[in-house]
Amino acid sequence: MTRTVLAALALGAAVAYSGAAFADKMKVTLDAKSEVPPNTSAATGTADVDFDPASKKLSWKITYSGLTGPATAAHFHGPGEPGKNAGVAVPISNPGTSPVEGSATLTDAQAADLVAGKYYINFHTAANPGGEIRGQVTK
């Protein structure tokens, strides 16, 4: 009887562990050639993006350098595939100093677009108000 109880507990723990949600980790490379249309900026950046499907929490840490001036705005845009522009989906607060960190809780529709690779990050400057560096968010 004791073995049966222990086996049941071990199986339950294994099922609970395997069913736990883990954050999706994404890496994004930002550059001027990914802008639509592309520009001649030498700026670059990288973003580490985590998404927890259970809570729909999106978290990010973005590092950039070489912008033509201070970042005036930054956003996650979507839904938009590479080569296409889309509206602002999630604002990125305080983009003026690198690194930029933040988080937001997505709606079901936003979460579906993010997981489908239809979000991109865009940093804007006075010299490039439509966007200076951009990168697609993919797994």
Image (tube, helix red, strand yellow):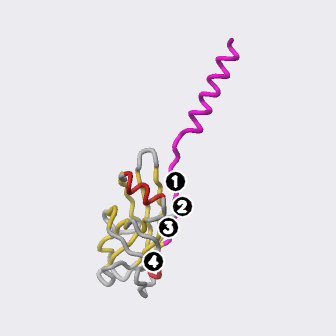
**Screen quadrant of the C terminus:** bottom right
- Residue designated by label 1: 24
- Alpha carbon of mark 4 to alpha carbon of mark 3: how far? 15 Å
Label 3: which secondary element? strand
Label 4: which secondary element? loop
The type of residue carrying mark 1 is Asp
- Front residue of 53/61: it is 53
Q: If you read the primary sequence from the N terminus, does the residue marked by circle 4 or circle 2 appear first?
A: 4
The type of residue carrying mark 3 is Val
Q: If you read the primary sequence from the N terminus, does the residue marked by circle 2 or circle 3 appear first?
A: 3
- Alpha carbon of mark 2 to alpha carbon of mark 3: how far? 9 Å
Q: If you read the primary sequence from the N terminus, does the residue marked by circle 4 or circle 3 appear first?
A: 3
1 or 4: mark nearer the eye: 4
Q: Residue at x 56, y 33 (%)?
A: 16
- Residue designated by label 2: 139
Residue 11 falls inside the magenta stretch:
yes
The number of callouts visible is 4
**Dot 4 surroundings within 10 Å: few (below 14), some, or many (20 or more)?**
few
The type of residue carrying mark 2 is Lys
**Dot 3 surroundings within 10 Å: few (below 14), some, or many (20 or more)?**
some
Q: In this view, does 7 lie to the left or right of 94?
A: right
Which range of residues does the magenta coloring cover? 1-29
The residue sitting at the bottom extreme is 40
Say if mark 4 contacts mark 2, CB within 8 Å: no
- Residue designated by label 3: 28
Q: Which numbered tag is attached to residue 83?
A: 4
The residue sitting at the top extreme is 1
